[in-house]
Amino acid sequence: MSIKTVATTAFDDQKPGTSGLRKRTPDFLRPHYVENFIQSTFDSLEGFAGKTLVVGGDGRYGNRQAIQTIVKMAAANGFGKVLVGQGGWLSTPAASCVIRKYGAFGGFVLSASHNPGGPNADFGIKYNIGNGGPAPEKVTEAIYAHSKTITEYKITDAADIDLDRCGNSQIGNTVVEVIDPVNDYAELMKQLFDFEAIRALFKSGFRMRFDAMHAITGPYAKVIIEQQLGAPVGTVINGIPSEDFNNGHPDPNLTYAEELVAEMFSANAPDFGAASDGDGDRNMILGNNFFVTPSDSLALIAANAKCAPGYQNITGIARSMPTSAASDRVAAALGLECFETPTGWKFFGNLMDADRVTLCGEESFGTGSNHVREKDGLWAVLFWLNILAARKESVEAIVREHWAKYGRNFYSRHDYEGVDSAGANTLMSDLEAKMPALIGTALNGMTIAYADNFSYTDPIDGSVSTKQGLRIGFEDGSRIVFRLSGTGTQGATLRLYVERFEADSAQHVQDTQAALANLIQTADDVAGIKRHTGRTEPTVIT
Ligand code: G1P
Ligand code: ZN
């Protein structure tokens, strides 16, 4: 085995987005593309000699090959140990768990999350730091800076490691250990939730369906939900990870989790339904003929946290800016601190490390806690199971009771996917330019209280993140928010977020889109969505 130094030419497009470097698979397959990004990451870090690196991914096309490259480069760059998930598998939250548990220096997660996989779909690489969370902006910016000037990378000429067998091997001085991808994570879940109560729930005939969407959570859900919690075999569907997610779109929402949604909205629906995404960090929660919005799910988990043994003392709640304010109401009632951060899980890390928050969530089907430093799909599902086991009421009854107590934040997100980038950018810049003049004026009968481009100052390290989304807030507390996606790979994706609070429980039965119709119309009136995107309808409504 020897270490080679390979000459390379920089790429100009290796800027990590909301969640790591994400591109079309053919872009990643360009010679030296993966190697450049990995070396740029190592070159931005200090003090990892002899330390441990964790590597795993969601099993999509390109996963195994990228892992072999990373392992050989980690050895050449002086890591003491590399922990790799068997089969190349580690869900995003499991990778975070493993980094924390074994005190690793950091880790790479290979995934493009909920984006489709395959030779003509998407791939991604995300670097996580020693706390188990996504690298903060100062690290991703340093990686990008290095990637623009890189001239060489280091790699060993060792043979490929056997990814399918657990155990140790050696590349030079570096130990490579292939570990079971599920064990450590399942162990952690057992410490947080009342497994006995959930087992009793399943014994009583409670029916559940979990849709792994042919992605990474299949192996985790089978072990935890079927084997350890005793749900009948078959509770987990689409449970074998496939390289192209069975040609599907592994995003757990009402549009893409079709099979689950059809069953949960049928006459003989199970009591509880859930799904997770490509890399296992997102979740969707459904009851019998009932959908729980992710924003409500965060609020409900917070309000019912005491049902779970691991959450007897929560310190605070954080949500991303576009997420509804439902959880703020719970925080106020419980006397907890609450925080509004920019979109992306990386903004929660400092708050959790400083023990200012225990629970975090995003409207984009992401919920989690300080047990790891990523959002965690299965964790949310287990939390709901624990609540259902403790309260012995239906999902719908629990949610309706919550609205009656706290009021309901009607909420919806409209995505215009793959629109022309120039049109989307013009929409945003035109809207931002006219914002100062909008304040104090009325639109469709609603007076605008504020209009700005959201900026955030991290309360722990003082770092400032600007241009995080255009917000228009009305005097009655309603708001509309516009953002361009930072995770898309084709054209631009415009996201419109709409929220209206309703205290009167007699109004809570309204259909969400109907309850928000005036705001949705106002959004088009003020921003010219149809005019700038050429679209008459959103691609996805959640
Ligand atoms: C999207 C979601 C965001 C989430 C991210 C990664 O980012 O909106 O909440 O953290 O995916 O899962 P976006 O495409 O909006 O930049
Ligand atoms: Zn994901």
Image (cartoon, rainbow, N blue to C red):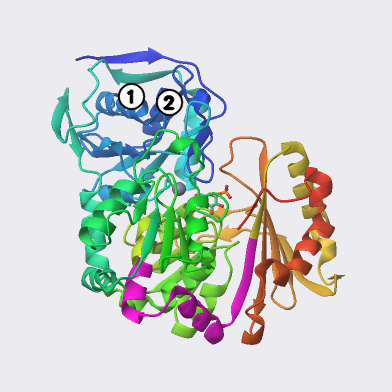
Residue 150 position within the rendered picture, expressed as x and y whole percent measured from the top left: 46, 22
* SS assignment at label 2: helix
Mark 1 and mark 2 lie on one chain; the one further toward the N terminus is 2
Q: Magenta span covers which residues?
A: 383-412
- Residue 44, above or below 457: above
- Relative to 185, 378 lies left or right: right
x 65%, y 77%: residue: 501
Quadrant in which the C terminus is drawn: bottom right
Q: Nearer the viewer, residue 139 or 250?
A: 250
- Relative to 266, 511 lies left or right: right
- Residue 441, above or below 228: below
Q: Nearer the viewer, residue 322 or 182?
A: 182
Q: Nearer the viewer, residue 202 or 14?
A: 202
x 47%, y 55%: residue: 260
Q: Amino acid at mark 2?
A: Val
**Residue at image mark 1:** 69
For the residues labelled 1 and 2, say whether their Cβ atoms are less than 8 Å apart.
yes
Residue 534 sits inside the magenta stretch: no
